[in-house]
Image (cartoon, helix red, strand yellow):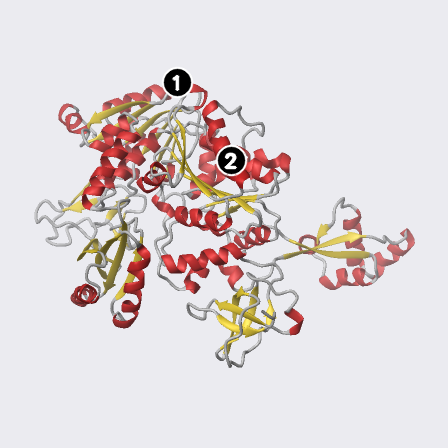
Amino acid sequence: MEPGVAEVVPFDGGARAYSYSVPAALKAVLQVGQLVRVPLGGRTSIGVVWKYPAEPPPAAKLRSVMVLEHEQPVMTPDCCKLAEWMAGYYGCGLNSVLETVLPAAIRKGVRPVLRRLLTLIAPPEAEALAKLRKKAPRQAQVIDYLAGQKDPADRAKMVDGLGVSQPAVDALIKAGTVKEDASVLWRVAYDDPYAEGETIPSAGHTLNPEQVAAVTSVTQTLDSKAFRAHLLHGVTGSGKTEVYVALIRKVVAEGGSAIFLVPEVALTPQTVGRLRSRLADLGAKVVVWHSHLSAGERFDAWMAMSLGQARVVVGARSAVFAPLPNLRLIVVDEEHEPSFKQGETPMYHGRDVAVMRASILGAACVLGSATPSLESWKNATAGRYALDVMTKRVDDRPMPAFRIVDMRREILHSKGQHILSRELTDGIRARLARREQSILFLNRRGHSRSLVCPDCGEAVQCKRCSVSLTLHRTDDTARCHLCNHQERAPVLCPGCRSPKVRWKGFGTQKVEETIAQLFPRARVARIDADTMGKKDLFRKVLSDFRAGKYDMLLGTQMIAKGLDFPRVTLVGIIDADLSLQLPDFRAAERTFQLLTQVAGRAGRGDLEGVVVVQSFQPASDPIQFAKRLDFHGFAAAELEKRAEFGYPPDRHLVRHVFRGRNAEKVNFVAAAWVKELERLHPGLCEIRGPAPCPFEKVQDQHRVHVWYLVTGVKSLLAAILPLRAKILGDEDVIDVIDVDAQDCA
């Protein structure tokens, strides 16, 4: 093909690529993945070069590419292939995939921030300087300042600090007295005072035999230059991170790049600190990638990766798209976590996209977890993934003792508060006396979960959602945790105006109050979405806890996994039944994973740990299997149940949600859709529904869902997407398709 035509995907041009002619000046430099500005309709648009050179369309007069926005490609060729696969597998437009893959600043064609640096290169003689002080004192002031600087001075900071004018500086540059250079200002995330507590010694540990076996297994894949996915199943505290670090060091030493995915922003600082310490001798730059970064930090990290200046990226699910050259390894830590699934279009799963990207590249992908997802476990036991197992904690440290408190008996036999059991209270008291640390986990924020009137039975619900309002005592508001609506906490029943209303249940705020009453001198840090709104506050609290400035860490799922605190010897799980109550076939799996992961925070140092689990259902399978640390037993029992009902991983679940303000219309459209689908494609798949979603109303939108259970997603989408485009055009009813759905609420 002649290099005269390129296919470009504009960001605002719908879900397709357009053909453009390439001007002579760009023919030799244009590459796939570059950003260009092109005409589109009556406007101009920025887009990605998708194919070059490309076949010219027959008998078409092509418009020309206008401008090359960045010489450096912002997407690698493999990422372009990955985006096409995502659009096909998740049934969405290519443009919506690109909005996810590329940060907004890149899509808008933003340029790097330049810092102007000044150097004194020809200082005037003493006599000339004396004259300058009389004629142009501001210029003399600049010369005096620069003469005292060892390094080039930042022009903006100098002008602001000295109060001199820009023309005074320009005159010195023009005279050749001062030289001005421009350099890119790199905004590096987590390069600040908090990073000191996040680093670890650079030497690392001597790997034990199980760790060596895991490293050897993945090394064989890396050396073969062929794709393979590995499931690293290691108990909590077994040293999986040391395995990841050893593999990343190998890749970097050989000139390759690596991606390290973590499920929570909370885990990023600890991981970044460890990698920066351990890769310093190789000169490898480690960058951070997640949604909490500033736009500038995201832009600079992306450009550093695409330029090859950064070789390792640590981040949440969207870091899987990092434009790293020579990508050899992708690590997905805590691969079982549902937070790897995006909740809006494109509803991709970071773990599955990581496996696919490694497959496209012929790279290695390591999925690590103490409690693997049943999907990954089935792939490993069926031989589709390599299975690497680590059964012991580092240095043969014992697993924490697991104690279950039956809260039904606790309430019968104890007086006073029933939030913290006697065993948990005694455990906290003992740790405070020994100056050890405790972690308390409750996956419910706020103070009290619902308001009930004993006179009329009224339960105060959100006006926009079908859920109760939660009391937040810090500002005396009642809030909805689905739509964020808030109002003053009522003191009278909204129904009968009775003053006898009572708030029931408890969240992290009420637990914090209870701890303050029982242990008034204890230093407690609470971590949940209400307290961690300010940037970097989370990192500061964790750094202070690690340094021993707090006795207790109380929090929601933000503290449930991955964090490593050697002085923690007690973990209390205040309400182990919360996740069991979810309206989801994965409720048992989620509960087992959560209990095992939270329990794993105890006894990670030289001191033995204890886990106290409070439950009203102590005999339930997930709690009993977690007590025995029996993942194999749990997986076998749960897989048998899933197969009986045809649930994942036995088949794929595709969830189709219909929503709108008019409940009657939503129900009608969903029912008519299912009827038409069954008529045109009988036997295509097992269809369940339509039925109301567990959260039937969210943000004034009534919600109904349909489940499709299939062995192959491709054939299902091939049938329903054209039909959907043809008959689902009612603007009052929005429908969303979620492939491999994780959230069924």
Q: Position of residue 594 (x, y in %)?
A: 31, 36
Quarter of the image for residue 420 reads top left
Q: Nearer the viewer, residue 458 or 160?
A: 458
- Tell me the residue that label 2 is attached to: 220
Q: Left or right of 388: which side holds 673? A: left
Quick one: label 2, few (<14), some, or many (20+) residues within 10 Å? few
Q: Left or right of 583: which side holds 256? A: right
Q: Quadrant of the N terminus?
A: bottom right
Q: Residue at x 8, y 47 (%)?
A: 455
Q: Left or right of 135: which side holds 572? A: left
Type of the residue with mark 1: Arg
Look at the numbered disc 1 and give the secondary structure of its residue: helix
Quick one: label 1, few (<14), some, or many (20+) residues within 10 Å? few
Look at the numbered disc 2 and give the secondary structure of its residue: helix
Q: Position of residue 13 (x, y in %)?
A: 45, 71
Q: Nearer the viewer, residue 209 or 504?
A: 209
Type of the residue with mark 2: Gln
Q: Is residue 506 visible?
A: no
- Tell me the residue that label 1 is attached to: 434
Q: Is residue 676 visible?
A: yes
Say if 665 sits above or below 522 in the image: below
Q: Residue at x 61, y 41 (%)?
A: 284
Foreground: disc 1 or disc 2 = 2
Label 1 to label 2: alpha-carbon separation = 47 Å
Say if 479 sits above or below 421 in the image: below
Q: Residue at x 19, y 45 (%)?
A: 645
Query: Mark 1 or 2 closer to N-term?
Result: 2
Q: Left or right of 520: which side holds 249? A: right
Say if 476 sits above or below 515 in the image: below
| Label of residue 287 in the image | none
